[in-house]
């Protein structure tokens, strides 16, 4: 079969080569299809057509895995440089625009999505109608570069040092809370150690471990491995179970402020509630900032300074 022309590439050629890069980087047709916004079958068809036009097999496929052939790996290495140059050139054009345009992909903690994005994102979307925003709400630790995201939001102490991180919130107060009915039916809780004889709603974090609850008072820091019949991996569900009198949950104070104000939940050990690192937005420093990201950061920072 004839190879792709060396001087004139069609729109379809460029699209297929970009799709190939996504498959090679993610090692998954399913994940690449989600990133590209097409079906898995359409992506597979594009890759078969690309290989047919090139006359070279680029990908090894099995029922569970996909990996590049030697030829595919060599092609991907050179394409990455080329597409990076194209992306940089297009980004540079934004300096000549009055307003940013394009797509912004963000990976965001569920707490940040509820506390920050519900407040600021509507304002951002209205101010920058030419930017389309994709938000993946995910508490798992994700390599945003390999997963194709432009930026992520995490707690400040969990971000790798090779990223640029910008603080976008105040320090965060963490609290243990339970319903009045649960607290009235169980022994009083005076110090963190008392939680070991209580029914706590355990939390499995994004890295797969069961979270140990932090408490601090007058310089005394205690980290408690709490017991519990129920373990959840989502703050919202843990709060709902606490409202249903199932035990004590642990979360950001801002997530339960309304319930506390209405008396539907009560704070446990309020003198021991710790202040922990703020939300940060982070992105790879070796890339040019994608269109719209600077404006989003500025919006968060303005809210922080207000």
Image: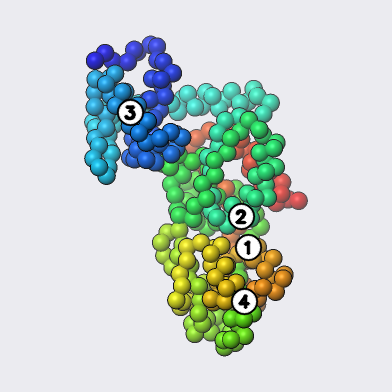
Q: Is residue 211 left or right of residue 178?
A: left
Label 3, label 1: how far apart the Cα atoms are: 45 Å
Q: In the image shown, does 196 or 164 lie closer to the viewer? A: 196
Q: Are marks 4 and 1 in contact (CB under 8 Å)?
A: no
- The residue where tag 3 is placed is 45
Above/below status of 121 relative to 214: above
Residue 77 visible in the current orientation: no
- The residue where tag 4 is placed is 179
Label 4, label 1: how far apart the Cα atoms are: 15 Å
- Viewer-nearest of discs 2 and 3: 3
Residue 188 is situated, as x and y percent measured from the top left of the image, at 60, 87
**Residue 7, quarter of the rendered image:** top left
Q: Considering only order in the chain, which callout, 2 or 4, is on the residue closer to the N terminus? A: 2
In the rendered image, the quadrant that contains the N terminus is top left
Binning the other alpha carbons within 10 Å of mark 2 as few (below 14), some (14 to 19) or many (20 upward) gives some
Q: In the image shown, does 154 or 137 lie closer to the viewer? A: 137
Q: Are marks 2 and 1 in contact (CB under 8 Å)?
A: yes
- Viewer-nearest of discs 3 and 1: 3
Label 2, label 1: how far apart the Cα atoms are: 8 Å
- The residue where tag 1 is placed is 255
Binning the other alpha carbons within 10 Å of mark 3 as few (below 14), some (14 to 19) or many (20 upward) gives few
Q: Are marks 2 and 3 in contact (CB under 8 Å)?
A: no
Above/below status of 214 relative to 46: below
Q: Considering only order in the chain, which callout, 1 or 4, is on the residue closer to the N terminus? A: 4
Which element is circle 4 on? loop
Q: Considering only order in the chain, which callout, 1 or 2, is on the residue closer to the N terminus? A: 2
């Amino acid at each position: 079969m004839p190879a792709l022309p060396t001087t004139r590439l069609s729109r379809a050629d460029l699209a297929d080569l970009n799709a190939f890069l996504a498959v090679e980087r993610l090692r998954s047709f399913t994940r690449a299809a989600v990133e590209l916004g097409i079906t898995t079958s359409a992506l597979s068809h594009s890759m078969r057509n690309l290989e047919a036009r090139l006359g070279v097999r680029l990908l090894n496929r099995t029922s569970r895995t996909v990996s590049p052939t030697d030829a595919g790996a060599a092609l991907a290495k050179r394409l990455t440089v080329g597409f990076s140059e194209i992306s940089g050139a297009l980004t540079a054009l934004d300096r000549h625009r009055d307003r940013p345009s394009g797509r912004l992909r963000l990976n965001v903690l569920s707490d940040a999505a509820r506390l920050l994005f519900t407040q600021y994102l509507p304002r951002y979307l209205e101010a920058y109608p030419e930017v389309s925003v994709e938000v993946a709400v995910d508490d798992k630790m994700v390599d945003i570069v390999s997963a194709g995201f432009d930026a992520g939001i995490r707690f400040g102490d969990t971000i790798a040092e090779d990223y640029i991180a910008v603080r976008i919130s105040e320090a965060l107060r963490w609290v243990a809370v339970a319903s009045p009915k649960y607290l009235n039916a169980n022994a009083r809780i005076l110090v963190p150690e008392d939680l070991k004889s209580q029914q706590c709603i355990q939390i499995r974090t994004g890295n797969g471990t069961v979270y140990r609850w932090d408490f601090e008072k007058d310089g005394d820091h205690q980290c408690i491995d709490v017991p519990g019949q129920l373990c959840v991996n989502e703050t919202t569900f843990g709060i709902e179970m606490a409202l249903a009198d199932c035990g004590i949950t642990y979360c950001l104070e801002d997530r339960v402020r309304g319930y506390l104000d209405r008396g539907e939940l009560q704070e446990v050990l309020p003198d021991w509630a710790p202040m922990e690192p703020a939300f940060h937005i982070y992105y790879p420093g070796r890339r040019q900032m994608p269109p719209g990201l600077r404006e989003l950061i500025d919006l968060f920072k303005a809210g922080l300074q207000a």
